[in-house]
Image: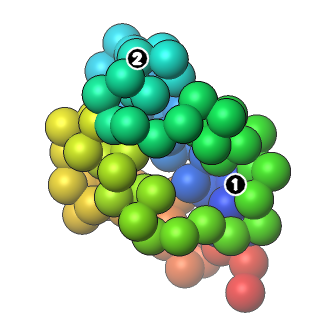
Amino acid sequence: MQLNEAVSKRLTELLQEKHMTPYQLNNKSGVPKSTIGNVLNCAYPSMKLRIVHELCQGLGISITDFFNSPLFDEDNLEP
């Protein structure tokens, strides 16, 4: 799996866990709805860590919590 796919899947998981919509995340994080949509749809081949940080702030979690998932295990990611 590509890194952007892992980020998309993790964000989807967290939105479900927090019972949040992308619109609610936009309101809490300040990340534009279009950017959140692009992350969820894997439209970016890569993204800035700043965006992930802002999404984490909106979700009320740390970056460590975001990346603490088997999705980011080296065995699951393509080089």
How many residues crowd around disc 2 within 10 Å: few (fewer than 14), some, or many (20 or more)?
some
Q: Earlier in the sequence, mark 2 or mark 1?
A: 1
Residue under label 1:
5
The three-letter amino acid code for the residue at tag 1 is Glu
- Above or below, 59 relative to 73: above
How many residues crowd around disc 1 within 10 Å: few (fewer than 14), some, or many (20 or more)?
many
Left or right of 54, for residue 11: right
| Location of residue 62 in the rendering, given as x and y in whole percent from the top left corner | 20, 55
Q: Residue at x 33, y 58 (%)?
A: 53
Residue under label 2:
24
Tag 2 secondary structure: helix
| Location of residue 19 in the rendering, given as x and y in whole percent from the top left corner | 36, 12
Tag 1 secondary structure: helix
Q: CA distance from mark 2 to mark 1?
A: 22 Å
Colour style of the rendered protein structure: rainbow
- Above or below, 30 relative to 8: above
How many numbered callouts? 2
Give whichever of 11, 76 is nearer the camera.
11
Q: Residue at x 76, y 49 (%)?
A: 42
Quadrant of the image occupied by residue 40:
top right
Left or right of 2, for residue 60: left
Of badges 2 and 1, the one in the foreground is 2
Quarter of the figure with the C terminus: bottom right
Can residue 16 be seen here? The reply is no
Quarter of the figure with the N terminus: bottom right
- Above or below, 67 relative to 33: below
- Above or below, 73 relative to 66: below
Which residue in the rendered view is the most extreme toward the bottom?
79
| Location of residue 3 in the rendering, given as x and y in whole percent from the top left corner | 65, 67
Can residue 22 be seen here? The reply is yes
Dots 2, 1 in contact, CB < 8 A: no
